[in-house]
Image (cartoon, rainbow, N blue to C red):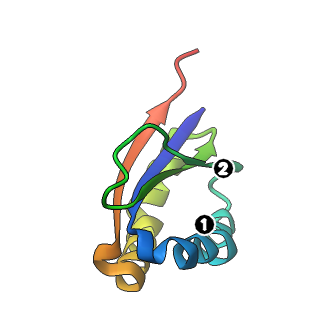
Amino acid sequence: MIVYNITSNVAHEVIDKWMSWLNEIHIPEIMETGVFNEYKFLQLLDIDETDGKTYTLQLICNDEQACRKYIKDLGPAFIQKTELMWGNSVYNFRSILKSVQ
């Protein structure tokens, strides 16, 4: 199992709008690519929330090559769209994880 993880720190003043956009537009668009077969959307707890709340979107697939192809070919457009939409109100950190069990 491969997880493409996007961790987002979201400024308090845009959380509601960002959450609606993420659930109604962004996640469905990513899932429509057909690369990922499921996802999990989680909030990080027990961390400093001075600058905003932190969430993680875990996009799950079975094929590492397909995930890397998504990151190379499709990911930049999603990143650009996110940056244009939210600017400095949302900071994203992306990583790839592999199940070891």
Image depth: mark 1 or mark 2 in front: 2
Give residue 21's quadrant in the image: bottom right
The tag on residue 48 is none
Give residue 46's quadrant in the image: top left
| Mark 2, residue position | 39
Residue 55 location in percent, x, y?
49, 52
Residue 67 location in percent, x, y?
51, 49
| Residue type of the residue flagged with mark 2 | Tyr
Residue 73 location in percent, x, y?
43, 66
Which residue is at the front of the view, 14 or 84? 14
Q: Quadrant of the N terminus?
A: top right
| Mark 1, residue position | 30
Q: Earlier in the sequence, mark 1 or mark 2?
A: 1
Q: Which residue is drawn at the image coordinates 64% and 52% (left, top)?
A: 36
Contact (CB < 8 A) between labels 1 and 2?
yes
Which residue is at the front of the view, 46 or 64? 46
Residue 18 location in percent, x, y?
52, 74
Give the spatial CA distance, label 1 vs label 2.
10 Å
